[in-house]
Image: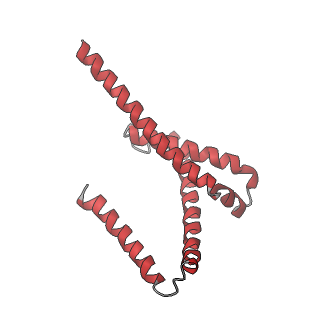
């Protein structure tokens, strides 16, 4: 009797801790995107400044849905009715990441000018790309 109750309480506690931890990380990431002005710049590029608040809300909903899908190990296309909102939220999230990447790429020339690095910048960028590739390979193939 008490063993099964303890087992259920342990599962609920682990689910709560996982959901809370994932929400904290996701909200920190979204806060970083918002504070850096990524959402504002995205709405400026697309000339949809009136929808900035909507973009922020969709980012939060996408992070929440992603946390729930990962936490409960639900396959993405659970039902066809969920596929459309998932694609919508994921598309906006990926769009924000693409714009954030474009902003980071602009940071390399500024950084190199500030530290007076005039030669070897291509080697640094290539090293970063190779490191990222090796890290992804080790994570996905070697360490599974």
Q: Indicate whether 32 appears above or below 5.
A: below
Q: Nearer the viewer, residue 26 or 97?
A: 26
- Colour scheme shown: secondary structure
Percent from the top left, x then y, of residue 77? Answer: 44, 44
Residue found farthest to the bottom:
119
Q: Indicate whether 10 appears above or below 83.
A: above
Q: Name which quarter of the figure residue 2 lies in.
A: top left
Is residue 109 left or right of 20 when viewed as pictured? Answer: right
Percent from the top left, x then y, of residue 111? Answer: 55, 75
Q: Nearer the viewer, residue 91 or 128?
A: 128
Q: Nearer the viewer, residue 42 or 74?
A: 42
Q: Indicate whether 116 appears above or below 60.
A: below
Quadrant of the image for the C terminus? bottom left
Is residue 131 left or right of 22 when viewed as pictured? Answer: left
Q: Name which quarter of the figure residue 67 lies in.
A: top left
Quadrant of the image for the N terminus? top left
Task: Name which residue lies at 23% across and 61% down.
Answer: 142
Task: Name which residue lies at 41% across and 78% down.
Answer: 126
Task: Name which residue lies at 24% across and 57% down.
Answer: 143
Q: Indicate whether 42 appears above or below 67.
A: below
Q: Can the viewer see residue 79 in this picture?
A: no
Percent from the top left, x then y, of residue 62? Answer: 54, 45
Is residue 12 left or right of 33 when viewed as pictured? Answer: left
Q: Nearer the viewer, residue 77 or 8?
A: 8
């Amino acid at each position: 009797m008490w063993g099964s109750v303890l087992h259920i309480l342990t599962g609920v506690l682990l689910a709560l801790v996982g959901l809370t931890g994932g929400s904290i990380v996701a909200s920190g990431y979204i806060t970083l995107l918002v504070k850096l002005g990524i959402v504002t710049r995205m709405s400026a590029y697309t000339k949809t400044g009136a929808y900035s608040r909507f973009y922020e809300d969709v980012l939060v909903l996408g992070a929440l849905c992603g946390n729930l899908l990962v936490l409960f190990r639900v396959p993405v296309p659970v039902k066809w009715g969920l596929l459309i909102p998932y694609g919508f939220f994921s598309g906006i999230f990926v769009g924000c990441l693409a714009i954030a990447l474009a902003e980071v790429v602009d940071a390399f020339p500024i950084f190199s000018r500030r530290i007076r690095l005039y030669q070897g910048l291509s080697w640094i960028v290539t090293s970063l790309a190779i490191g990222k590739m090796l890290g992804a390979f080790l994570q996905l193939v070697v360490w599974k």
